[in-house]
Image: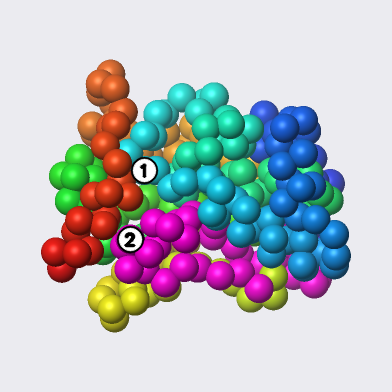
Amino acid sequence: MTDQPGPQHLAPTWYLDSDDVRLADFARRAAGEGSERERAIRLYLAVRDEVIYDPYGVVLEPFQFKASTTLARRKGFCVTKSGLMAAAARAIGIPARVGYADVKNHLTTERLRKRMGTDVFAFHGYAELFLGGKWVKATPVFNIELCRRFRVLPLEFDGESDSIFHPFDADGRRHMEYVNFRGAYDDLPFEEIRRTFYEIYPYMRSDAAPEQADFAADAAREAAAA
């Protein structure tokens, strides 16, 4: 993979389906007019705040990881929201790809910690956009309302510097640690993600229905009790 974008960074894929009509309409509406950087920032805010973060409802089926599916549900987790960001950027002519890292999330909920059996989130997703002659990381994952409940500073994006999670929350507590960067991909690597999730989180192999609890409500309760 080179540092320069290629045609694949503007092309739709099955997962990053930037040619979906509703997704393209969403991207154009959210981005509006202006410079490429200004449009990218507005698109970032739309994906961050109009699509709710929900790690409880992860279903390891290919269709659930399509960008258009995430937009239609208006819910997603880091992998799917970042995929939506990359697809939407491509839809408005901004070269984009997806990137992943393994992180320690110290402010997850007790319910999710028990299900996962760890505070390590493998394949934490973000998008990379080619702006101003360089690749810039953008992480439109935690919507602003959830940040307020969790007492986490909302993650901003200026279109010029990398936007990855803050190491501390609004109260100075440890929030997120990046322990291993897996790198960037031209398309969402679903099979690799599923294989890794099955290895690290055995509960995901179960046929049980996905968790239906309210992640935001759990976050607010735990933040209030801290």
Give the image location of residue 220, x and y in percent: 26, 57
Establish if 151 lies above or below 210. Answer: below
Type of amino acid under label 2: Arg
Give the image location of residue 208, x and y in percent: 25, 21
Mark 1 or mark 2: name the one nearer the start of the chain: 1
Establish if 195 lies above or below 92. Answer: above
Q: What residue is disc 2 on?
A: 149
Residue 84 location, quadrant: top right
In the foreground, 99 or 90: 90
In the image, what residue occupies the spot 47% across and 56% down?
Answer: 143
Seen as rendered, the residue at the extreme top is 207
In the image, what residue occupies the spot 63% across and 49% down?
Answer: 85
Which quarter of the image is occupied by the C terminus?
bottom left
Q: Secondary structure at mark 2?
A: helix
Q: Secondary structure at mark 1?
A: helix
- Specify start and end residues of the magenta stretch as a single range: 129-158
Type of amino acid under label 1: Pro
In the image, what residue occupies the spot 23% across and 32% down?
Answer: 203
Give the image location of residue 156, x and y in percent: 56, 70
Give the image location of residue 52, x and y in percent: 47, 46
Q: Is residue 126 visible?
A: no
Q: Tell whether position 146 is magenta.
A: yes
